[in-house]
Image (cartoon, grey):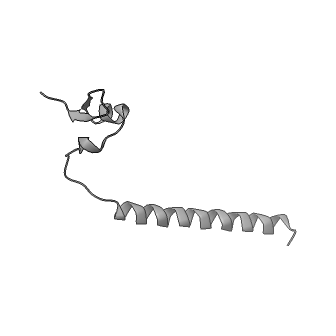
Amino acid sequence: MDSPVTKLIFIAAAVAASVLVVAVMWTTLGSNAPQSTDDAVEYSKIQTKELCDAVGGKWDGSKKCAPQSG
């Protein structure tokens, strides 16, 4: 059990198991993610200026986001 070869095998097995878990989770979460074809933004739910700017909205200073006109 104290052999370097045995330790190397256990490390390789642990890495392989970790890669397997990541691959399964990536696939599961990727296939279950919502696929939105609707580009509508609910501006009324945005509560920060930074997010409002990021979605192309207009921050009016009263903690409300509105769509850009024009």
Q: Position of residue 7 (x, y in %)?
A: 79, 65
Q: For residue 30, what is the image quadrant?
A: bottom left
- Residue shown at 55%/66% (left/top)? 20
- Residue shown at 29%/45% (left/top)? 45
Quarter of the picture holding the C terminus: top left
Closest to the observer, 37 or 45:
45
- Residue shown at 42%/66% (left/top)? 28
Q: Is residue 7 above or below residue 35?
A: below
Q: Is residue 57 above or below residue 10?
A: above
Q: Is residue 48 above or below residue 10?
A: above
Q: For residue 44, what is the image quadrant?
A: top left
Q: Position of residue 5 (x, y in %)?
A: 80, 66
Answer with left or right where residue 65 lies relative to residue 21.
Answer: left
Residue lying farthest to the left in this orientation: 70
Quarter of the picture holding the N terminus: bottom right
Q: Position of residue 9 (x, y in %)?
A: 73, 67
- Residue shown at 20%/46% (left/top)? 39
Answer with left or right where residue 21 lies relative to residue 15.
Answer: left
Q: Position of residue 59 (x, y in %)?
A: 28, 29
Answer with left or right where residue 70 lies relative to residue 5.
Answer: left
Answer with left or right where residue 4 lies relative to residue 47.
Answer: right
Residue lying farthest to the front in this orientation: 62
Residue lying farthest to the bottom in this orientation: 1
